[in-house]
Image: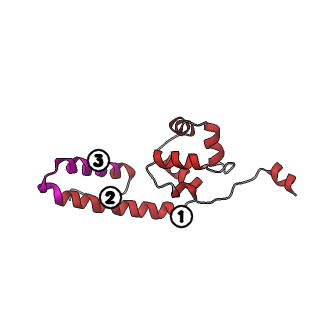
Amino acid sequence: MKYRKIVSIEQYEEYCNLHEKLGLKDDVKYQDEIDLLEILIEEYDNRTSTYRKRLNPVELLDSIMQDENISRAELARDLGTTRQLISDILRYRRNISKNMVVKLSERFSMRPEAFSRPYKLQLKKKEISAKT
């Protein structure tokens, strides 16, 4: 069997690239292969997006960074921000701003809603005692 159920991001990217190449050939003889690739890609998208919908934006970002082996410094460079801001977001110290939602969604080719869902910040012990 030439194609199998997609089980990794590497396989997903390989199938997406192949789908794009076959689509550019604009040849009827590849239509069945293109259709099969679309089904496999869509199934993977649905499976992973369902999993990721359960994650809050910070968990989602952390998951993507781990999947793609991206460091905080690397992501900060890509987004034109500081590593400290990325660290603060990942430690639940700062909310993801609307501007950052746009940058993250563009960087990871995802819908902005994935990074704009509400989540709770974790206050430092000093902040908690000052409020009481």
The residue at 85%/55% (across/down) is 131
- Residue 110 versus residue 39 in the image, above or below: above
Mark 2, Cα crowd under 10 Å, few <14 / some 14-19 / many 20+, is: many
The residue at 83%/49% (across/down) is 126
Tally of marks = 3
Type of the residue with mark 2: Ile
Q: Which residue is mark 1?
A: 54
Query: Is any part of residue 128 visible from this angle?
Result: yes
Q: Which residue is mark 3?
A: 17
Write the start and end of the magenta stretch as one range: 13-31
Q: Is residue 131 left or right of residue 66?
A: right
Q: Position of residue 64 (x, y in %)?
A: 49, 50
Residue 7 inside the magenta-drawn segment: no
Q: Position of residue 1 (x, y in %)?
A: 20, 59
- Give the mark, 2 or 1, whose residue is nearer the N terminus: 2
Residue 18 inside the magenta-drawn segment: yes
The residue at 47%/44% (across/down) is 107
The residue at 55%/54% (across/down) is 115
Q: Which residue is mark 2?
A: 41
Mark 3, Cα crowd under 10 Å, few <14 / some 14-19 / many 20+, is: few
